Amino acid sequence: MIPIGKAARAAAYILALAPTDVKNTALRWMAEAIQQHSAEILSANKKDMELAQQKNLTAAFLDRLALNKDRIAAMAQGLITVADLPDPVGRILAAIKRPNGLQITRISVPIGVIGVIYESRPNVTADAAGLCLKSGNAVILRGGSESFYSATAIVAALHEGLHKAQLPTTAVQMVPTADRSAVSEMLKMDQYIDVIIPRGSQQLVDHIAAESRIPLFKHLAGMCHTYIHHAADKEMARKIVLNAKMRRTGICGATEVLLVDQAVVQSHLPAIINDLIQAGCEIRGDEQTVKLDQRVKATNTKDYDTEFLDAIIAVKVVKDIAVAIEHIAQHGTQHTDAIITEDNKAAEKFLQEVDSAIVIHNASTQFADGGEFGMGAEIGIATGKLHARGPVGLEQLTTFKYRVQGNGQVRG
């Protein structure tokens, strides 16, 4: 691990000074290499999938792990999109002229070396590499053991693109083992790695937070809520809830808990329950929800605190918006929460008082994604409050320094 860290630090120095056009050329070569080597990547992914199926992993997990031609094309397009975005390095964030004539400029600069520890999503490999490269950072990737072969094949393609652009291939490195002890070593490498970004289960994040010597951009569980206010449009609520839960159940932006105002239980909830069940979703509800439809299962004590990442949703009837906000404060993870209402005052109250990284009015929680925010891609959704919060894209992968220019001033 130490040689990997040293190589990353050396590469980071080169990338910090790399011109925008060189970085963009590298990203486009990387995208082309992914497309050219799609057969090898799919073959590697097939091997990962077979091993995962032998372990009887969930359908949601397998969906996150699976690659196909469309997903590979999306990975390549993500790199091109990042290339087309403005360079986040070298931006003037503030300019101050002091009475003594000093000119002080705050300017954005790369963080340095980013460590990304993630689980089953192979596409994170390309997304993280592309974002780190464009923001002038070297990256050390440690994917989950279940996606080891897929990630290895993707990194090989990325190296081909870097080589063609005459940038060091050590700008993107992958920990070459699935042994968990490598993660422990990585978390001690504070002399080489500037920040760790964990992306995965709550268990993974908790383990890394307890063991790391390196600062984290935490990505906690996506306990996302959708709240149907009494002033919600019925058809809009149906459409949004179905998408928020079922578009892709295994992503962190999928709604896990549906809160419904008491006043619209009879008018709004039956159709929503039917939509979800027809789409293959298991519904676990409180006493009122169970009474509405015999197909609803009764909730247990853990359902309102469980990130299902599957076709399961917990439903709770609430008295009013104040109770809904209180429930989110007690059970949420400050990730993404949404309100559906035509009452702008209620919407403003929710957006103001819910303390989550992303708060949404009249739209699906599945928009909690860097690509949907116009960032090109993301490494994850940060739920902490220091430096990065929400989608971690190019801007969040920079820090800043102050440049002070004088003409002979001395301090009295």
Image (tube, rainbow, N blue to C red):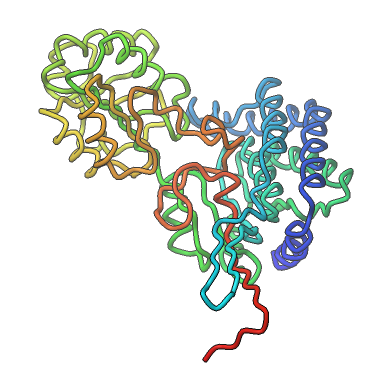
Residue 307, above or below 208: above
Q: Is residue 125 left or right of residue 256?
A: right
Left/right of residue 50 with respect to residue 382 in the rendered view: right
Q: Residue 252: percent from the left, percent from the top?
A: 44, 35
Up/down of 411 relative to 18, above or below: below
Q: Nearer the viewer, residue 3 or 395?
A: 395
Q: Position of residue 213 (x, y in %)?
A: 51, 68
Across and down, in percent, residue 205 comes to: 45, 52
In this rendering, would 89 be left or right of 355?
Answer: right
Q: Nearer the viewer, residue 110 or 179?
A: 110
Residue 358 vs residue 58, the one in the foreground = 358
Task: Name the residue rendered at 61%, 56% in the picture.
Answer: 92
At a point 36% along the width and 13% down the height, the residue shown is 239
Q: Residue 296: tell me if it is visible.
A: yes
Q: Is residue 314 visible?
A: no
Q: Which image quarter: residue 140?
A: bottom right
